[in-house]
């Protein structure tokens, strides 16, 4: 990896490149479960399309599985 990133409490994002200075950004409080359910309801009723494509959802699962595998093995995992 060429650095690290961290999200705390869903509102505070910090990133630091190796050998560089870290940057932090605070975001307003949000309720991601509520937002996802509202987006799902809008998609089901035909109001608007769901904001995440099937390909993006599948890729997100692959990323989470790679993180889990990397944590267990201590090795980088290519997706």
Image (spheres, grey):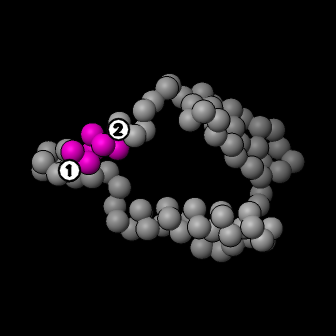
Q: Element under label 1?
A: helix
Instruction: Confirm whether the magenta stretch covers residue 37.
Output: yes
Q: Who's the residue at 60% across and 73% down the image?
A: 79
Instruction: Confirm whether the magenta stretch covers residue 29.
Output: no
Q: Upstream in the sequence, badge 1 or badge 2? A: 2
Residue lying at the far front of the rendered structure: 72
Mark 2 sits on what residue? 35
Q: Is residue 44 left or right of residue 70?
A: left
Residue 76 location, x and y as percent? 74, 70
Q: Who's the residue at 40% across and 40% down the image?
A: 33
Q: Who's the residue at 54% across and 28% down the image?
A: 27
Residue closest to the eye, 25 or 11: 11
Residue lying at the far left of the rendered structure: 46
Residue 46 location, x and y as percent? 12, 50
The span picked out in magenta is 35-41
Mark 1 sits on what residue? 43
Q: CA distance from mark 1 to mark 2?
A: 12 Å
């Amino acid at each position: 990896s060429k650095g690290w990133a961290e999200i705390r409490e869903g509102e505070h994002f910090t990133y630091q490149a190796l050998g560089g200075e870290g940057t932090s950004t605070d975001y307003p409080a949000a309720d991601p479960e509520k937002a996802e359910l509202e987006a799902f309801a809008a998609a089901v009723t035909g109001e608007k399309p769901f904001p995440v494509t099937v390909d993006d959802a599948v890729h997100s699962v692959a990323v989470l599985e790679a993180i889990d595998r990397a944590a267990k093995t201590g090795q980088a995992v290519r997706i």
